[in-house]
Amino acid sequence: MTLDQLRIFIMVAEREHMTQAASALGLTQSAVSAAIAALETRHDVKLFDRVGRRIELTSGGQTFLAEARAVVARAQAAELVLSELGAAPGGVLNVYASQTIASYWLPQRLVSFRQSNPRIDVRLHLGNTASVLKAVESGAADLGFVEDAVGSSILTADEIGTDEMVLVVAAGHPLAKRRKLSTADMMAADWIVREPGSGTRSQAEAALQAMGLDIHARRIVMELPSNESIRAAVEDGAGLAALSDLVVAESVATRKMHRFQPGLGRRAFFIVRHRDRHLSRAAQALMAHCQPATGRNRK
């Protein structure tokens, strides 16, 4: 078993598609298929099931995925230790981020960080707030970025930015004629929401409860796994949603969506690290790069 085989297995598991995994790794599909076949044959285990054009992890594959990620993470950590013996920080930095930050706040900062630190390769992994915090706790992530409060005694969080939660419907929705929504309007509406564990969902629900809305009595018609899928559903007239102003800005500007006033309030973005684990020079450099010029707010 080689590290390359483990990296290929992890990418296939994450993409659930051989061709997409091969493209992401810069390999041929035959090379990716051969690596998976070698693992399965050598250890006499089936790691994937084919479901239509997609593939899914078997129960054995799911168990192996956690171990494979841990091994690759340790190898990358060893590389970071060696790189720190050099003059400038380098190596691979594993960063986990929740969806709003990963898609709308972090990319431009990673580009400028990479320009300033060409020896550091950043691997960005997408998840929701709960999965990001779990990755930092387990050591799979060197750093995490989340939009929700961090309630863990073993994690340290620094505030690095903000967005605003807003309520939106399609421009042609009957409620779009109104500037402001009443509690009765919201109770009568069809809601599209993120999955449990999402910072967007928990922050929105806390704000709605503060306004007096019974969030458990509202009519949820769709629970979707990403901001983009919710935005598309709202644009098609499926109902009312609470999303970040960063997510809906283009749709509102092009009049595909109607945004209600006032918003649900601003929320903080945090960069998270493990309190007791060694913080590499590469991780320290990214933390410093993402800090606002006005200073820090540690939780």
Image: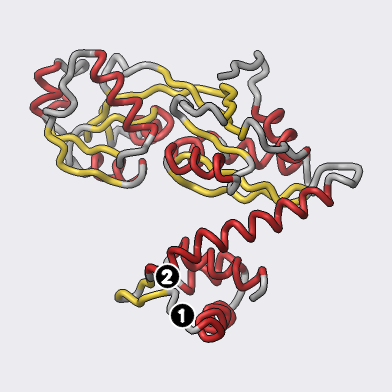
Q: Say whether marks 2 and 1 touch (CB < 8 Å).
A: yes
Q: Along the horizontal axis of the image, is 262 left or right of 163? A: left
Left or right, residue 4 beside residue 64: right
Q: Quadrant of the C terminus?
A: top right
Judge by depth and name the residue closer to the eye, 265 or 232: 265
Disc 2/disc 1 C-alpha distance (Å): 8 Å
In the image, taking residue 76 as reference, residue 205 lies left or right, namely: left
- Residue drawn at x 35%, y 25% as measured from the top left: 203
- Residue 110 image offset from top left, x and y in percent: 64, 40
Choose the circle earlier in sequence order: 2 or 1: 1
Q: Considering the image in quadrants, where does the N terminus appear?
A: bottom right
Residue beneath the point at 39% across and 32% down:
199
| Number of marks | 2
Q: For the residue marked with disc 1, what is the amino acid?
A: Val
Residue under numbered circle 2: 60
The spot of residue 244 in percent (x, y) is 38, 29
Residue assigned mark 1: 45
Occupied quadrant, residue 186: top left
Residue, x 34% and y 36% (percent of image)? 251
The colour scheme used to paint the residues is secondary structure
For this orientation, the residue located farthest to the right is: 87
Q: Residue at the location (20% across, 16% down)?
A: 180
Q: Amino acid at mark 2?
A: Gly
**Above or below, comparing residue 29 to residue 152 in the picture:** below
* Nearest the eye: 213 or 293: 213
Q: Secondary structure at mark 1?
A: loop
Q: Measured along the vertical axis of the image, is residue 61 above or below residue 285? A: below
Give how far across and how far down residue 129 sits, in percent: 44, 37
As drawn, 170 above or below 16: above
